[in-house]
Amino acid sequence: MILGVAEHERGRLNERSLEVLTLGRRLAHRLGLPLHAVLVGADAEPLVARLAPYGVAVAHLVQHERLDEYAPAAWAQGLVGIIEAERPQAVLAAGTDRGNEVMAHVAARMALPMAANCTEVEPGERYRVTRLRWGGSLLEESWLGGTVKLLTVAPQAVPAEEAPVLAPAAVKPVTPALAEGDLRVRVTARIEATRGGISLTDARVVVSGGRGVGSPEGFKALEELASLLRGAVGCSRVVTSQGWRPHADQVGQTGTRVAPELYIACGISGAIQHLVGCKGAKRILAINTDPEAPMVARADYAIIGDLHAIIPALNAEIRKANADQPPR
Amino acid sequence: MNVLVCVKRVPAVAGKIMLTADAQEIDTRYLGFTISPHEECAVEEAVRLVAAHGGSGVVLTLGPPAATEQLRDAMALGLDRAVLLETDGREWDPMATAAAIVDAVRAERAAGVEYDLLLFGNEAADTGDYQVGIRVAHALDRPCVTGVKALEVRDGRVVAKREASGGWEIFEVALPAVLTVKEGLNLPRYPSLPGRLRAKKKAIEQIAPQRSGGGLEKARLKPPKERGGQVEILGRGPEAAARAVEIFRALGVL
Ligand SMILES: Cc1cc2nc3c(=O)[nH]c(=O)nc-3n(C[C@H](O)[C@H](O)[C@H](O)COP(=O)(O)OP(=O)(O)OC[C@H]3O[C@@H](n4cnc5c(N)ncnc54)[C@H](O)[C@@H]3O)c2cc1C
């Protein structure tokens, strides 16, 4: 059997899990094995119906009164119990913060190797996996050994795809044997972000600034452009390390990955670590004084010149267009 | 408190990445070397914690002899000692790396040095394995919080925050503990000249680690598919604004 971890937060499914199950189903199909899923924690049962269209034959529900809050080692212990009882050939989770963390705990507990952020998986005695390096600026082909193959799937590497439902998934509740040590690390409190403003990950337009913006004040014009386009402001790493913007705004390998309809890169050279953060954008507009900048070469559209003159002109043009036409 | 920071030497890539002819490594003939931005923050945090709470800060790396460069950089920022787990430069997978670090921590313990806190980057810039810190924590039976972007040490406990969808998750654990941190935790300082001079004179402790474990083996590297497409130059300077607005309309973002 192939086991896919469906990640959820108190009953809200992480969509990446559907990508994991899609890859899991293809793998299971090739091997002639069934696909099982596992959900850890409270409020998971209603999600089983959402997993069935992805080819899940059995959904294991790991339930325990102490699993009301996320606890990585306890989640891992829940998985280890199922792995020991059911002996899957491979276990797949999403390459998210939680997915990578829980699988690494499973790997440590079972003394098994694990491959993080895979994009392709070829089964065999050892699995041949392709996975992200440098946040996706490079790919690595590797051999993954171990009696059970543990791997995580890079976000957006495999589009989620439904399959015909032959039978509803069977539900199998399991109560893990947890030790006190498994619960030493557990969410003890949460701080909800103050609402208002559009988050970088959800925004349809992201206006990002780099070193070329020159100063924190320089971002005023970008803020205005973002608000005219109902978008969010992002930035490059140079900007955060100068302290011009908070790190939460950083787009890239060590920042946020964005996937807007339109990404406007202002005064950003397009270093490879920045590009991996914005390559999910449908369209890219680069504004740069340097026509040879990698950002310009990777863009769909470019305006060559000083952003300090171009962005105010853009803002004025949008205001004019809005005045000509009543707002939608 | 005693803090151990684990870092990894990686090439400082910026533009197009060139591979060696056998596709085993990045061609580093014209590149410098560095550590991951996450690890820079781990080093900075160790310096701050030792300044605030006393004790000593030690930096450790598993890598080739040339990785002494990264160890000296860390000492120049204020760490007291450095340990090199010397390899021949070939890659060790996360299991083998973690096992060697565990051995080193146990050896330090046998020599009377106990660490209250082990700091790692959340993932190395190059391999992005996400597991060395967790494996070390498990072997040493210590709690491990990952992805930490803010932390506070008080009364033998550490309160750590990490970003979660729509806000922050808070974890509170007793020391000794293991934390893997992310960029954004702090703004790393630059080394001072006296710091550099001091670091130059310090000895680096060298250990020949035993390679054990493993099971993830690199076959080759390859470039990803490029974002295709031709760039349309809308114009030079502010007069391109009108054309840009037409495109915003066509894309449905205006
Ligand atoms: C492991 C690792 C991880 C990293 N992670 C990230 C990450 O997550 N995100 C990230 O962004 N970077 C990251 N970096 C850093 C990255 O390599 C670059 O250093 C950074 O992206 C450069 O930022 P920049 O483009 O703003 O600055 P620069 O490279 O200095 O480019 C500035 C650009 O602005 C243009 N310009 C200057 N003035 C003007 C003007 N008046 N009008 C218009 N254009 C102008 C210039 O032509 C140039 O193209 C990482 C690096 C490493 C090693």
Image: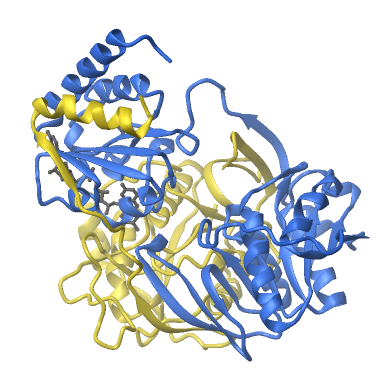
Q: Residue at x 20, y 32 (%)?
A: A213
Question: At 40% from the left edge and 27% from the top edge, which residue is drawn?
Answer: A231
User: In percent of the image, x 23 and y 59: which residue is there?
Assistant: B14
Say which colour chain B has: yellow
Chain in blue? A
Q: Quadrant of the C terminus of chain A?
A: top left
Q: Nearer the viewer, residue B241 or A96?
A: B241
B98 versus A176 height, above or below: below
The image quarter containing residue A205 is top left
Q: Is residue A51 above or below residue A228?
A: below
Question: Which sits in the foreground, A248 or B206?
Answer: A248
**Count of labels shown?**
0
In-front residue for pair A201/B131: A201
| B185 relative to A315 in the view: left or right | right
- In the picture, measured across the screen, residue A295 lies left or right of residue A11, that is left
Whole-percent x, y for residue B122 in the image: 50, 57
The image shows residue A287 at horizontal and vertical percentages of 18, 37
In the image, taking residue B177 as reference, residue A156 lies left or right, namely left
Q: Nearer the viewer, residue B72 or A72?
A: A72
Q: Quadrant of the N terminus of chain A?
A: bottom right
Residue B140 visible to an observer of this rendering: no
The colouring scheme, among rainbow, by chain, secondary structure or one colour, is by chain
Task: Using the rendered view, name the quadrant where residue A93 is placed.
Answer: bottom right
Query: Residue B56's x, y, as percent?
Result: 47, 56
* Residue located at (18% from left, 29% from top): B243
The x and y percentages for residue A137 are 35, 63
- Residue A19, can we see it? yes
Q: Pick out the residue farthest to the bottom.
A: A125
